[in-house]
Every structure is written in C-alpha cells, then in structure tokens.
Amino acid sequence: MLCFILLIFKWSGYWPFMPSPHPAVLEFEKMVADREKYRKELEEWVKYSWRWAVSDKYRFIFRVQASVLRGIREFLDSRGFVEVLSPVIGPVTDPGIRGAKQATINFYGAEYKVMSSAILYKQYMAASLGKIYFVSPNVRLEPLDSIYTGRHLVEFYQVDIEMYKASYIDAMDLAEDLVSYVVRYIQDLHGKELEEKLGRTLPEFKRPFKRYTHREAVEFVNKLGCRNPPKEELLWECEKLMSAHHDSPFFVYDYPLGSRGFYDREDPERPGILRDFDMLYPEGFGEAVSGAEREYEPERLVARIRGGGEDPAKYSWFLQMAKELYPLQTAGFGIGVERLTRYLCGLRALWEARPYPKVAGIVGGP
C-alpha cells in the first residue's frame, strides 16, 4: 500500500517531500502482498522461534535490545527518575487500546484484567515518588488482521514514564531527549556491528524534532493522497506514509476529544482538544511514543468514562484515589521496547524484535 501511494505521487509530479522508507519497511510490504504465503511463513516463524533465535543475527539483535534497556535506565536515572515495580493484573486496565481486547482472569471469584498498559498505576506512583518509570509487560488481544501491519504483538514490553506536576510539553521534551540519548548510546556501543551485521546506519537527527498539531498532520497526509478523517487518530497507512517523509522523529499533538482514552486531559481553554501527543520514528517505521497530560478533575473523569461507554464503578479505586490525592496532576508517556528495537536494527516487523513472539491468531510454539 505504501509503495502504491508513493508511486502515484511520483508519476503525478506531486512530490512535496522526498520519501525515504527504510528497505526493511518496503520488504515487509512485499511480504504481505501475498497474505496466504505470508501467514504460513509467520506461523513457522512463531511456532519454531528457537531455530532463528540462536542465529548470529538475532543473538546480536537481542544484545542490542539489552543495551537499549540499559541506556533508557541510565538516562532516566540521571534525570532523577525512580524505577518501580509495575502491576501485572488488576481490576481494570487501560481501556484506550485502539481495537484490541483485554485479557481476563478469575481472581478468586472476581474478574481481573491482565495489564494492557499500566497507565492508571503510573499516576499512583508519580504521586508517591514524583518522577517514576516502569519496565512493564503488556498483553493486548489484537485483531486478527494486525499480523499484516508488522507493528503489533499480543505480548510486548514498554517503558512507562510519569511525572508529577508536569505538562505534556514537559513530557514531549523528555521523550525527545530520551530517544536522542538512546540512539546515540546504541550508535556509540554497536554502530560498527549494526552496519556490518544488519546493514543499518543510524541517521543523525535534526533537533528540535518537528511538531505538528493533529490538524496539520491530517492536512499533511491528505495532500499525499491518504484520506484521514479529521476527528480520528492517524490511520496506520497514513502514519506510515508521513513517517516515510521524515528523516528524524517528529511529534503529532493535540488530538481531538474522543480519539484517546478518558485519562488524557481535555484542554480547558480549547474544548474538544486533548493535551496529548505521539512521537513517530522516521523512515516509515511509525509510532514510537504516546503520551499526555492526565485528566485530574474527578467529575470530568466520571463524565469521560461514561462518554466512552463504560461504567465508572469499574474504576472505583482510581476515582477514589483521584479525590483523595486531588489535584493529581501528572503527565507522561510510554515507549515500546520492541518498536524501538525494530527501528534501531532496521527490522521488517516486531516479530523480529523479541524472542518467543506472540501475534494475533497464531497459537503453538513457545
């Protein structure tokens, strides 16, 4: 799809920016062109993952991933953040998981959720320690067709970061510093091997990273022929196309109300606009970071939960905490470990970016 859109605009003479999707992104597009063949290959990959995990290529990728986590911790610790334990189960989890379903267990007769994101718990610990982060496992039962995006896993890790009394501008600044630091860290540590083993040369980023409002981003992709509804998140094909037109990460911020979870704060001076953001990697790799300021007015939280079609009673502990710790003003973001690994190593899909990968609809194997 990406190749098709790019060719249309090349032939038409409309070429406002020179796109530069990474070869691995284009290779994945070719793989999924024959969906039946691709699915069979992916089933083999998942069911017998130990066969490729012991190869020199993936031994190196796993070492890079270990360095990524070390670099993230070094950066955050140097900024005064405290690593804390993340929950694995709880009475509720993140409802804003964009089409995926939550995994449920029976917890002594009560329905508990396996964490799809520990976002509600980050605020809890930010109130305690000020600046915190989790290295947290997440489970999301993604739609069956998510195997054709290359960017979804059912089981994945993210680093969840939260700051007390901070704004979403503070969070964006921190995310830019963090990603820039980790890319330099990996370049210094593994740059030569990345080129020799994976043919990957990490680019020099242009800073500050460009920032687009959601409205500007929609106009950008619409001009490229990818029609994105104005009140919705960027569609994956549109996000990928916009990403391919950049050679450094960039932000999209101020998403419309209704496009994100109840916990992202609506701007009191601009009704209908959320104080939230995404960071996207360049070269067609897509989303890197997602974050926001958090809604902290108890009555607004209840209204937003109801507006999303849910019962506020499900979130009783969270709403009680918001009242007792009022005003629980925090901001933060999450960054996917496998997505960062994919970008740094120039991989085709997330199922290359971790051992024992689990993807939608494919069972068996480790």
Image (cartoon, grey):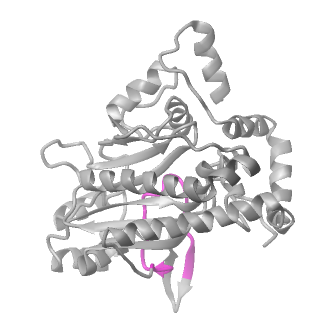
Compared to 341, does 233 lie above or below?
above
Magenta residues (range)? 86-105
Instruction: Determine if residue 358 is in view.
Output: no
**In the shown orientation, is residue 185 left or right of residue 128?**
right
Which image quadrant for residue 19? top right
Compared to 229, does 91 lie above or below?
below
- Residue 185: percent from the left, percent from the top? 51, 58
- Residue 123: percent from the left, percent from the top? 30, 72
- Residue 33: percent from the left, percent from the top? 77, 34
* Residue situated in front as seen by the camera: 252 or 341: 341
Compared to 278, does 1 lie above or below?
above
* Residue situated in front as seen by the camera: 259 or 47: 47
Residue found 67% across the figure and 26% down from its top: 3
* Residue situated in front as seen by the camera: 241 or 103: 241
Residue found 41% across the figure and 53% down from its top: 290
* Residue situated in front as seen by the camera: 350 or 188: 188
Classified by dominant secondary structure, the portion drawn in magenta counts as: loop
Please state, as top left, top right, bottom left or bottom right, where the C terminus lies in the image. bottom right
- Residue 13: percent from the left, percent from the top? 56, 7
Residue found 33% across the figure and 42% down from its top: 255
Which image quadrant for residue 331? bottom left
Q: Is residue 316 magenta?
A: no
Total numbered labels placed on residues in the image: 0
**In the shown orientation, is residue 204 left or right of residue 215?**
right
Please state, as top left, top right, bottom left or bottom right, where the N terminus lies in the image. top right
Which image quadrant for residue 199? top right
Instruction: Determine if residue 274 is in view.
Output: yes
